[in-house]
Image (tube, rainbow, N blue to C red):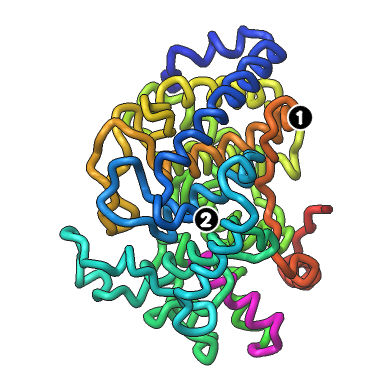
């Protein structure tokens, strides 16, 4: 039985692509001017190089909010309209002041108090697992936003509760245990890549984890763990850096579109679902660039205009939901669920827009970078490693 589609799919596909593309470009330009004004509203008045989660936030300016906003300002081409060169330099000094060990950071705003909903059974307070990983990643993300664009935000030591470099032979058992958390799995496989490139571990732990990861894709849908977001995690953290192909690319595109076309897709839509959907398609298109191309391009242009029309708030910020900001980041409480823009909605929906900008080729019309492909500081080393991995796995690398 054919699945029911949302009402606007056929309407969008009946429209002219150039008309949809032009509307999306105009909508982005208008929203960008509002973004600049919103960023000024959420900056710390005493330290104007850093930002809060929302206009009405619960916490002081922090590394997560700042990283999200900074990197969106960079990729939207408006950083110089918000921060001076001196403020960017001040921001770098701020992040370095939070470094308590090499590549390990502690943010006073995030550690000021334990969130009321914190699950100490999942992770102790102060955090030593996934939340510590996040704090480190977004501190490094701030450095990227302040100008260190070749810095890879995921690189650095794993949090204390995860396998360490001397425990590389235990990573396979660990990732099998935490499945289906493909975010954690992808991050640990990335650590194995880095450790191997540094000459600290042999090739075997990495190869056995990659073999296992490939085996976990559903050949009928192209998904890992049955969904758009879990699939994205393994693509962005492992397959893209190594230049490895996404198996079953046509089926993956089919599955993503089938999900987006569901009548209930926009019901309480989480921003990551939208961004990850277009990332999965774009990654698959590196192998099958013409597959359902016209259809996807029309849908991409439509979704830019749709999200901007439904999620931009009166404060000119882009909210995670049409009627409210997202109140939490992981387990941290960040704001009350008010009708206001938030750093997460801006960053994640904005990252999805950037993919669509690239696919549609509207960088010049919008000033948006259309940047989404992996760009590590040692990308050449990753690509060389990818050739070695591809030979062992019997797959064809994606040409760059």
Q: Which structural element holds mark 2? A: helix
Residue 217 appears at what percent x and percent y?
A: 54, 54
Residue lying at the far left of the rendered structure: 116
Q: Is residue 288 visible?
A: yes
The answer to whether the residue labelled 1 contacts the one labelled 2, judged by CB atoms less than 8 Å apart, is no
In the figure, residue 359 lies in which quadrant? top right
Q: Which mark is residue 364?
A: 1
Q: Which mark is residue 233?
A: 2
Would residue 188 be counted in the magenta stretch? yes
Q: Which mark is residue 237?
A: none
Residue 104 appears at what percent x and percent y?
A: 47, 78
Q: Which residues are magenta?
A: 185-201
Q: Is residue 251 visible?
A: no
Residue located at (25% from left, 51% from top): 58
In the figure, residue 109 lies in which quadrant? bottom left
Q: CA distance from mark 1 to mark 2?
A: 29 Å
């Amino acid at each position: 039985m054919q699945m029911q589609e949302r009402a606007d799919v056929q309407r969008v596909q009946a429209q002219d692509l150039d008309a949809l593309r032009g509307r999306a470009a105009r909508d982005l330009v208008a929203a960008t001017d509002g973004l600049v004004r919103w960023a000024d509203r959420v900056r710390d008045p005493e330290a104007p190089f850093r930002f809060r989660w929302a206009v009405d936030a619960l916490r002081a300016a922090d590394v997560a909010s700042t990283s999200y906003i900074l990197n969106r300002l960079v990729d939207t081409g408006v950083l110089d309209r918000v921060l001076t060169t001196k403020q960017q330099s001040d921001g770098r000094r701020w992040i370095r002041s939070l470094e308590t060990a090499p590549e390990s950071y502690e943010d006073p705003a995030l550690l000021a108090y334990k969130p009321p909903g914190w699950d100490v059974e999942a992770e102790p307070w102060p955090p030593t697992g996934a939340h510590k990983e996040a704090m480190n990643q977004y501190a490094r993300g701030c450095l990227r936003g302040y100008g260190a664009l070749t810095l890879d935000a995921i690189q650095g030591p794993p949090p204390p509760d995860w396998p360490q470099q001397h425990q590389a032979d235990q990573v396979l058992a660990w990732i099998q245990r935490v499945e289906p958390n493909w975010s954690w799995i992808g991050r640990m496989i990335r650590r194995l890549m880095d450790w191997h490139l540094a000459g600290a571990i042999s090739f075997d732990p990495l190869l056995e984890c990659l073999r296992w990861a490939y085996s976990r894709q559903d050949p009928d849908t192209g998904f890992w763990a049955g969904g758009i977001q879990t699939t994205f995690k393994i693509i962005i953290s492992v397959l893209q850096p190594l230049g490895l192909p996404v198996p079953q690319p046509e089926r993956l595109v089919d599955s993503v579109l089938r999900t987006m076309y569901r009548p209930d897709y926009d019901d309480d839509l989480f921003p990551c679902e939208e961004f990850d959907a277009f990332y999965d398609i774009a990654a698959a298109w590196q192998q099958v660039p013409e597959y359902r191309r016209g259809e996807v391009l029309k849908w991409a242009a439509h979704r830019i205009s749709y999200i901007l029309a439904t999620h931009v708030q009166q404060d000119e910020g882009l909210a995670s939901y049409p009627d409210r900001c997202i109140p939490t980041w992981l387990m941290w409480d960040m704001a009350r669920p008010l009708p206001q823009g938030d750093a997460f909605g801006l960053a994640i929906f904005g990252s999805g827009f950037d993919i669509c900008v690239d696919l549609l080729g509207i960088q010049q019309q919008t000033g948006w970078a259309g940047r989404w492909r992996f760009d590590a500081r040692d990308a050449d080393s990753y690509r060389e490693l990818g050739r070695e991995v591809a030979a062992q796995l019997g797959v064809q690398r994606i040409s760059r």
